[in-house]
Amino acid sequence: MKNIIIDTDMGVDDIIAISLLLNNPNINIKAISTVKGVSDLTTGTQNLACLLTWLEKTDLPIYQGFEPPPQKVNFPNSDRRRANNLTLLNSLPLPKFPSKKICIRKLNNYLSRPTSLLCLGPLTNIAKIIKNSKKNINEVFIMGGAVFKPGNIPPDYLCEYNIALDPIAAKIVFSSGLPITLVATDATKQAPAINEQFLKAVLATKPQAPEGKIIKTIIINNRRDFIDFYDPLAAAILVNPKLISSSKKINLAITSDGQTIGQLNKTGNINLVTKINKQAFYQFLINSIN
């Protein structure tokens, strides 16, 4: 069983990723930390606590992390409103307030035991953890960057939000020498969230577990709120690396505006996912709903 900490900015696709892992028999989530990204830090933390309350996961610790330094870019206001208000989950009876059993602490940047990290937001928290606990980090899975493919930030689409929101932290993480599996837009563009055949299969599911209900609800209510399965793909690859059809070892340079410049290097510490088994990934999502 793999021990992991999830770091999230609580976007709607983050919630799918978290739900995919909560009941997976091969994954032991030790804690979830929050970072400001598409959601505000305090709001995202409270939303996570309310979700865990509804899921009856009140024993899972939450660590409220940090806000990235101000940057020139930010998520569109419409995306931020949907994330902060959990708009895509309005049809579920989520509590307005979290259970008092849930423990919310400030992130202390220290890992006491060997752990893997799943990074679904800006890398602000992760850079701080690496400085203090590098020896206890087994591996890092990151959704972020646009290496050899276009990004998702208009108008030029050279960058991706998670990296561009804290380029300095990204430099620290990618230059750490730690084994990193990078799920950039190079891979996520191969897993579009709007796929007619896949959506028909999702509509036919009958989830019993609340995690499955969350995944299904977000997917069927998605109206281009997220175009590709960004964070869910990273979570799925963490569970099943066989979803990767091909990858390349690279070194990565980060510009001051968050552009990721990759250089092929057979001894590089970053394993960039370049091709995935799309149908197997979609089936993974369907199986997780059911």
Image: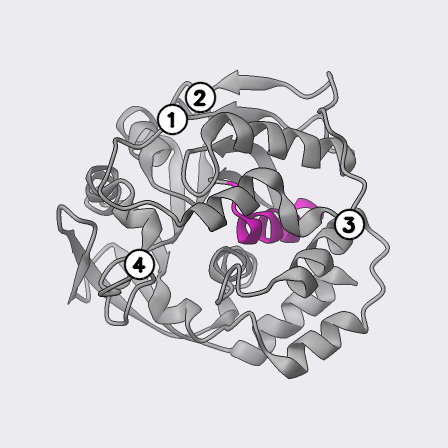
Name the one closer to the observer, 119 or 223.
223
Q: Earlier in the sequence, mark 3 or mark 1?
A: 1
Residue at image coords 60%, 25%: 61
Within 10 Å of disc 1 (Cα), the crowding (few <14, some 14-19, many 20+) is: many
Q: CA distance from mark 4 to mark 2?
A: 29 Å
**Type of the residue with mark 3:** Ser
Within 10 Å of disc 4 (Cα), the crowding (few <14, some 14-19, many 20+) is: some
Residue 88 screen position, x and y as percent: 65, 52
Q: Earlier in the sequence, mark 4 or mark 3?
A: 3
In the displayed structure, would residue 38 be above or below residue 268?
Answer: above
With 10 as the anchor, is 149 left or right in this view?
A: left
Q: Is residue 25 visible from the viewing direction of this image?
A: no
Q: Is residue 84 magenta?
A: no
In the displayed structure, would residue 48 be above or below residue 64?
Answer: below
Q: CA distance from mark 3 to mark 1?
A: 30 Å
**Type of the residue with mark 4:** Ile
Of badges 3 and 2, the one in the foreground is 3
Residue 114 screen position, x and y as percent: 45, 34
Residue at image coords 61%, 73%: 282
Residue 103 screen position, x and y as percent: 63, 18
Question: Which mark identifies residue 107?
Answer: 2
Give the residues in magenta.
10-25
**Residue that badge 1 annotates:** 66
User: Are discs 3 and 1 less than 8 Å apart at CB?
Assistant: no
**Residue that badge 3 annotates:** 91
**Residue that badge 4 annotates:** 153
Mark 1 lies on a secondary structure that is loop
In the displayed structure, would residue 53 be above or below residue 104?
Answer: below
**Type of the residue with mark 2:** Leu
Of badges 3 and 1, the one in the foreground is 3
